[in-house]
Amino acid sequence: MFAGKPEYQQLIYKVEKLLKSYTVYELISDDQPQRRKLSERVRIEPFQGKSNTTGTDTILRGREATRWAKNTITGIRPTHKKNVFYGDHKTNGKKELILFRFNDDRTQLVIEYYHGFYPNTPKILFDLI
């Protein structure tokens, strides 16, 4: 067992727009807005092979001022637990863990953003989930 869960920022999103090819989520709660690295609107869409992302069929994009970012924030990778996925985001060249927790109908998404932390073994990731 992992000896204590590292601190994380919790962001809660709800579905704003659901289309056949992607889903847009809008931020409804952020427990640490001064630390936010994700935008107030995010989009989850199928991976189309246009980045270095590996091990996933789905990606997360953020919203820039007037358009969706061209760069992928992270791939969304499955875990052993239903409706829980993980990804990473690079900040100053270092990976930071992002956990995605969907409700059963995927109308709500809770993101746990672990600033300055990425598990160095699969077991640590498993224990966090």
Image (tube, helix red, strand yellow):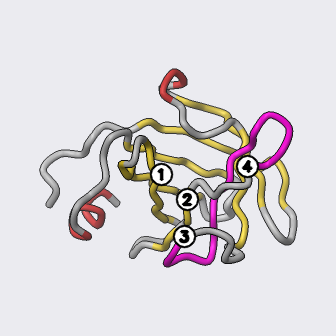
- What's under tag 2, amino acid-wise? Thr
- Looking at the image, do the residues carrying marks 2 and 3 touch, with CB atoms under 8 Å apart? yes
Q: Earlier in the sequence, mark 1 or mark 2?
A: 2
Assign a secondary structure to mark 3.
Answer: loop
The Cα–Cα distance between marks 1 and 2, rounded to whole angstroms, is 6 Å
Q: Nearest to the eye among marks 2 and 3: give it.
A: 3
Question: For mark 2, what is the residue?
Answer: 74
**Which quadrant would the N terminus be assigned to in this image?**
bottom left
- Residue drawn at x 49%, y 65% as measured from the top left: 85
Where is residue 2? Give x, y as percent. 16, 56
128 with respect to 11 (left or right):
left
Look at the image and give the residue range highlighted in magenta. Answer: 54-69
- What's under tag 1, amino acid-wise? His
Q: Which mark is residue 53?
A: 3
- Residue drawn at x 86%, y 71% as measured from the top left: 20
The Cα–Cα distance between marks 3 and 1, rounded to whole angstroms, is 11 Å
Question: For mark 4, what is the residue?
Answer: 69
Q: Main secondary structure of the magenta part?
A: loop
Where is residue 69? Give x, y as percent. 73, 49
- What's under tag 4, amino acid-wise? Ala
- What's under tag 3, amino acid-wise? Thr
Assign a secondary structure to mark 2.
Answer: strand
Q: Which mark is residue 89?
A: 1
In-front residue for pair 4/96? 96
Where is residue 80? Give x, y as percent. 39, 75
In-front residue for pair 121/18? 121
